[in-house]
C-alpha cells in the first residue's frame, strides 16, 4: 500500500535507536540478504558494526523513536587527510589530519518510496556530519535544522559509492535541489586471470592478521604522496584542484572489506591470503577482497602500492592469488595514470564504470568541484 506523503518540516533526521537499527536490518534483508537467513543477516550486520558507525533515520519530529520511520542510512567517521597544494615543486604541500564521513546503507522500504524521503534524508545529512561554517542557509520550508550528535559531526568532506546513478546524490545538496555529492573517477582496470603459474620467491603472502601491520605503513605512504603531489593538468579528475582529500585505511577501514564480502559464503582465499608484499621492496604491496555477487566472482584490490617497475610483478602475484582460489577476474579501481599504461601492457582493460560510482561532497572553503579525491577505492 502506498502511504500519503508528509510535510518535510514535520520530519527530521535522528540518531537511530538500537531498536531502529534492528528494524533497518529487517528491512534490508529481503533485498540484500542473498542466501543468508534473517537471523544470519542480522548477526553479520551486528558483527560488522564498527566503533565509528552511526545509524541515522528520517522520522516524524513528534515520534523520533518510532519503528515506522521513513528511511535510514549509516555514517562512518573516518580519519582522513587533506592537502592544500602549492604550485611550486620546491615546497611540499601542507597536509592536515581531518575527519570525513563515509555514507552507506541508504534504504527506503518499497511502501514509502518515491515520496522524496531518501532525497530529504540526504539533504539533512550534510547538516549533521559537516562543520556548518560553510553550509548555505537552512531552508525555512524544512523547519529547524536536525540536532547534531556529539562526536559525529565536524566533517570536512563526505563520500559514498552510488548504485543508483549520479543524479540522486548530486541533486541532494544542503540548501535544496542540486550542489550535492559529485562523481569522481569511476575508473576500473580489469584483468582476466590466465593459467600461468609463478613461484613465490621474493614475495610474502599476508593473512588478515598480518595485514593489520600494513595499514600504518600505508597511511604513512599516502601522507608522503599528498605532500609531494604536484598539481598538473591531466593527472586529476578536476582541472586544477585546490584541495586533495583522502580517507585513511587505518582504524579498520580497509580491514572491514574482507569479512563483509565473505560472511556466510564459506569462501576463503587459498591459504587465507588477502594480501601480498614484496620482500625486497616493502613499498610494493596489495590487499584485496572478493565480490561474490558479480559474475564471475571478482578479486577486488582494496589497496595497492607499486612503482611502474614493480607493478607487473605485483599484478602477477595478485592474479596468482585469484587463480589459486578459483577466481577468474581481478579488478582495481582508479589506478594511477602511470600504472594504467603498465597495466595495459600486462593485458588489462581500463574503462569507466556505470555502477558503484564514487561521489564526494566538500564542506571546507571553496566548492566540491575543485576538490580531488585521492584513493577513491572503498
Ligand atoms: C534509492 C532509494 C533509497 C530511494 O528512496 P526514495 O525514498 O524513494 O527516494 P526519493 O523519493 O527521495 O527519490 C526517488 C528518486 O530516486 C531515484 N532512484 C531510485 N532508485 C533508483 C535507481 N535504481 N536508479 C536510479 N535512480 C533511482 C530516482 O531518481 C527517483 O526519482 P523518481 O521518483 O522520479 O523515480 C530506494 O529506492 C531504495 O531504498 N532502493 C533500494 C536500496 C538502494 O538502492 N539504495 C541506494 C544504494 S546507493
Image (cartoon, rainbow, N blue to C red):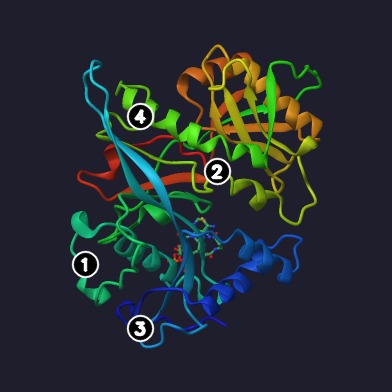
Q: Position of residue 162 (x, y in %)?
A: 49, 51
Name the residue beneath numbered marker 1.
Answer: 138
Image marks 1 and 3: residues in contact by CB distance under 8 Å? no
Q: Position of residue 93 (x, y in %)?
A: 27, 27
Q: Is residue 362 visible?
A: yes
Q: Disc 4 and disc 2: Cα gap in Å?
A: 19 Å
Q: Disc 1 and disc 3: Cα gap in Å?
A: 17 Å
Disc 3 residue crowd, few under 14, some 14–19, many 20+, Cα 10 Å: some
Residue 27 vs residue 180: left or right? right
Q: Which is closer to the viewer, label 4 or label 1?
A: 4
Of mark 4 and mark 2, the one earlier in the sequence is: 4
Residue 91 vs residue 349: left or right? left
Q: Secondary structure at mark 2?
A: loop
Q: Is residue 289 visible?
A: no
Name the residue beneath numbered marker 3.
Answer: 61
Q: Position of residue 168 (x, y in %)?
A: 42, 56
Does the beta carbon of the residue at mark 1 sit less than 8 Å from ligand 1? no
Is 131 placed above or below 71 here? above
Image marks 2 and 1: residues in contact by CB distance under 8 Å? no
Q: Which is closer to the viewer, label 3 or label 2?
A: 2
Of mark 2 and mark 1, the one earlier in the sequence is: 1
Does the beta carbon of the residue at mark 2 sit less than 8 Å from ligand 1? no
Of mark 4 and mark 1, the one earlier in the sequence is: 1
Please tell me which residue lies in front, 50 or 126: 50
Amino acid at each position: 500500500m502506498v502511504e500519503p506523503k508528509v510535510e518535510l518540516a514535520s520530519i527530521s533526521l535522528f540518531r537511530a535507536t538500537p531498536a531502529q537499527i534492528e528494524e533497518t536490518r529487517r528491512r534490508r534483508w529481503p533485498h540484500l540478504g542473498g542466501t543468508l537467513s534473517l537471523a544470519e543477516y542480522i548477526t553479520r550486520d551486528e558483527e560488522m558494526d564498527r566503533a565509528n558507525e552511526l545509524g541515522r533515520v528520517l522520522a516524524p519530529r513528534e515520534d523520533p523513536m518510532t519503528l515506522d520511520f521513513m528511511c535510514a542510512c549509516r555514517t562512518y567517521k573516518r580519519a582522513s587527510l587533506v592537502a592544500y597544494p602549492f604550485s611550486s615543486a620546491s615546497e611540499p604541500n601542507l597536509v592536515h589530519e581531518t575527519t570525513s564521513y563515509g555514507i552507506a546503507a541508504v534504504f527506503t522500504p518499497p511502501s514509502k518510496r518515491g515520496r522524496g524521503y531518501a532525497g530529504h534524508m540526504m539533504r539533512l545529512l550534510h547538516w549533521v556530519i559537516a562543520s556548518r561554517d560553510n553550509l548555505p542557509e537552512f531552508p525555512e520550508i524544512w523547519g529547524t535544522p536536525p540536532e547534531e550528535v556529539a562526536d559525529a559531526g565536524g566533517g570536512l568532506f563526505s563520500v559514498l559509492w552510488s548504485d543508483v546513478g549520479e543524479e540522486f546524490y548530486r541533486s541532494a545538496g544542503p540548501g535544496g535541489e542540486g550542489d550535492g555529492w559529485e562523481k569522481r573517477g569511476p575508473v576500473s582496470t580489469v584483468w582476466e586471470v590466465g593459467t600461468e603459474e609463478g613461484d613465490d620467491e621474493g614475495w610474502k603472502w599476508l593473512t588478515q592478521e598480518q595485514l593489520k601491520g600494513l595499514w600504518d605503513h600505508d597511511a604513512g605512504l599516502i601522507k608522503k604522496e599528498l605532500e609531494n603531489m604536484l598539481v598538473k593538468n591531466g593527472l586529476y579528475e578536476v582541472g586544477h584542484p585546490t584541495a586533495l582529500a583522502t580517507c585513511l585505511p587505518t582504524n579498520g577501514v580497509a580491514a572491514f572489506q574482507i569479512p563483509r564480502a565473505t560472511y556466510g559464503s564459506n569462501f576463503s582465499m587459498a591459504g587465507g591470503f588477502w594480501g601480498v608484499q614484496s620482500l625486497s621492496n616493502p613499498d610494493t604491496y596489495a590487499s584485496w577482497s572478493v565480490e561474490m555477487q558479480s559474475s564471475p566472482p571478482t578479486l577486488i584490490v582494496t589497496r595497492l602500492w607499486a612503482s611502474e617497475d614493480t607493478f607487473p610483478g605485483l599484478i602477477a602475484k595478485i592474479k596468482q592469488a585469484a587463480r589459486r582460489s578459483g577466481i577468474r577476474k581481478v579488478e582495481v579501481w582508479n589506478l594511477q595514470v602511470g600504472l594504467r599504461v603498465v597495466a595495459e601492457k600486462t593485458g588489462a582493460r581500463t574503462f569507466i564504470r556505470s555502477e558503484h560510482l564514487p561521489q564526494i561532497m566538500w564542506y571546507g572553503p571553496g566548492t566540491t568541484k575543485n576538490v580531488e579525491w585521492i584513493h577513491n577505492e572503498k
